[in-house]
Image (tube, helix red, strand yellow):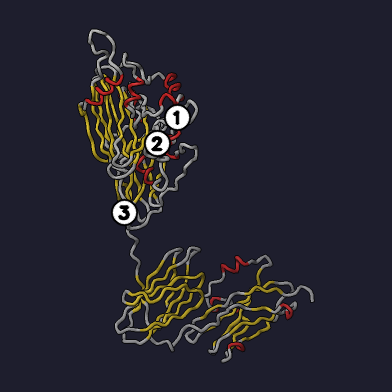
Amino acid sequence: MLLLHCSMSYLLLLLPFNSWTQKLPTRDEELFQMQIQDKTFFHDSSVIPDGAEISSYLFRETPKRFFFVVEEDNTPLAVTVTPCDAPLEWKLSLQELPEESSGESSGEPEPLEQQKQQIINEEGTELFSYRGNDVEYFVSSSSPSGLYQLELLSTEKDTYFKVYATTTPESDQPYPELPYDPRVDVTSLGRTTVTLAWKPSPTASLLKQPMQYCVVINKEHNFKSLCAVEAKQNIDDAFMMAPKPGLDFSPFDFAHFGFSSNSNFGKERNFLKSSSKFGRHIYSKPKADLEKICIGNKNIFTVSELKPDTQYYFDIFAVNVNTNMSTAYVGTFARTKEEAKQKTIDLKDGKVTDVFIKRKGSKFLRFAPVSSHQKVTFFVHSCLDAVQIQVRRDGKLLLSQNVEGVRQFQLRGKPKAKYLIRLKGNKKGASMLKILATTRPNKQSFPSLPEDTRIKAFDKLRTCSSVTVAWLGTQERNKFCIYRKEVDDNYNEEQKKREQNQCLGPDMRKKSEKVLCKYFHSQNLQKAVTTETIKGLQPGKSYLLDVYVIGHGGHSVKYQSKLVKTRKFC
């Protein structure tokens, strides 16, 4: 039976000087429940009932002392201190209890102040000391009776910690037991995944206690306790409302530790989502670079969505579901595999190259002109959605732009320069494009295009057998071919979008769909417009119209498709 006490005077008040063996508090469950509900009983005291874990707060460079009494000789004793967030210095010492009487013939007990002074003046015998951030234990199978003092100090910063003490360590076993091999093994390693495996805790198999495992992933270091993880997660929000120095603070104020107000003590000590002394709940936003996942009683787990070529640290914690107390396995770390090195495609001067890019993927191309050049021109034709192009010359970034449709980029040349082109797809889906690099821009394979590549239909000129459309041209003379295809009445924009691959040329169309081809241009861009009436259509039918512009090198670009419908009655 243990008593921990911050206030020495109150300790002596609780223990009447005519009897050092009063039961405070008892392990009798009913009496214990009555005691913890009476908060005046614990006022201004740090009490750990025998076999319970408490949490407390430390201010930097301000030591805190706890006291407990072991009443009988040859009593088993176990004390566990768990640092959270910062290393601790702590020591455990023993002081003999004062005699019940002074023995000066009067038989009267010594005054209270004399007993208090006697205890304070005695330094006691140091039993154990530790400095660090490990979960450390003091265990004795046979401890003498006496007053035990636990003194803790944090030299780095304000922090909190946990203390557990018991006189029945063999039967309690609140912390899950580790297997004979407590290491976490990496069984599979990929670019974005790591598979972990560990041996199950005997607590679940032998003691039949409910268990779950929690996996912690971060990029900084391994953790030695679960409360250290939670301290890191909640770094922006206090684990509890930190007490102010000099104010009345009782670590056994149960609101600080998530105890429910009913009698189900210990069944739900959810102090990770702590409530303040004033009843205001504090919900902390987890740190983005630290993740905790509780996975039940499985002892194999695959972590996914990791970054390639990145080192991660992995920790496993066995958690007793009944007590919410945990034990750390020996953590591990691993570096994910590098991204597969992409094959670089060589571009030949003046030759069009087709490129396919997977969703969210990228491709690398290299252009190394064989002769000196003053300028280099890149023509890029994005067949579907927009793609991003980056061009570096000898490692220096010269260009970074998104490309839709056909774009031309002209860059200053440099003798013996080498160009690296990175093409990056988008999140919507796969990308297709054509690219041409040349040091002779006058010899183009790509046709020039107007800014607006829509086809306009004139509703008033629509008949039962014809439609009239118009489209824009450029100052350069190009060849335009128009095609038609009958479609169902329920043909919609989504179906039209699937057919918007601008890189598919007229050679992929049926000859029966061809309407005509013609050349036109105008030096005045406002007059670079052509119209065409498409005849021979059926009444009340829907048609998909496509216009292709064909360059001097034979490369074609499709305008935006247009859905039209003839009149049903004329």
Q: Residue at x 37, y 21 (%)?
A: 25
Amino acid at the residue labelled 3: Gln
Q: Earlier in the sequence, mark 3 or mark 2?
A: 2
- Amino acid at the residue labelled 1: Lys
Q: Give the vertical position of 40 relative to 152 (above or below).
A: above
Q: Tell me which amino acid carries mark 2.
A: Leu
Residue at x-position 42% and y-position 24%: 41
- Do tag 2 and tag 1 residues touch (Cβ < 8 Å)? no
Q: How many marks?
A: 3
- The residue that label 2 is drawn on is 247
> Which is nearer the eye, 203 or 89?
89
Left of 261 or right of it: where is 438?
left
Residue picked out by circle 1: 267
Mark whose residue sits in front, 1 or 3: 1
Looking at the rendered image, the disc whose residue lies closer to the viewer, 2 or 1, is 2
User: Residue 15: where, in percent of width, then height?
Assistant: 34, 19
Q: Is residue 155 visible?
A: yes
In three-dimensional space, the C-alpha distance between marks 2 and 1, rounded to whole angstroms, equals 30 Å
For the residues marked 3 and 2, what is the alpha-carbon distance in whole angstroms? Answer: 45 Å
Name the image quarter holding residue 120: top left
Residue 565, by quadrant, is: bottom right
Q: Residues within 10 Å of mark 2 (few under 14, many from 20)?
A: few
In the image, residue 308 sits, relative to residue 78, either above or below, namely below
Question: SS of the residue at dot 1?
Answer: loop
The image shows residue 512 at horizontal and vertical percentages of 62, 78
Sooner in the amino-acid sequence: mark 2 or mark 1: 2
- Horizontally, residue 533 falls left or right of residue 552, namely right
- Please name the residue that numbered disc 3 is placed on: 311
Which badge, 1 or 3, is on the more N-terminal residue?
1
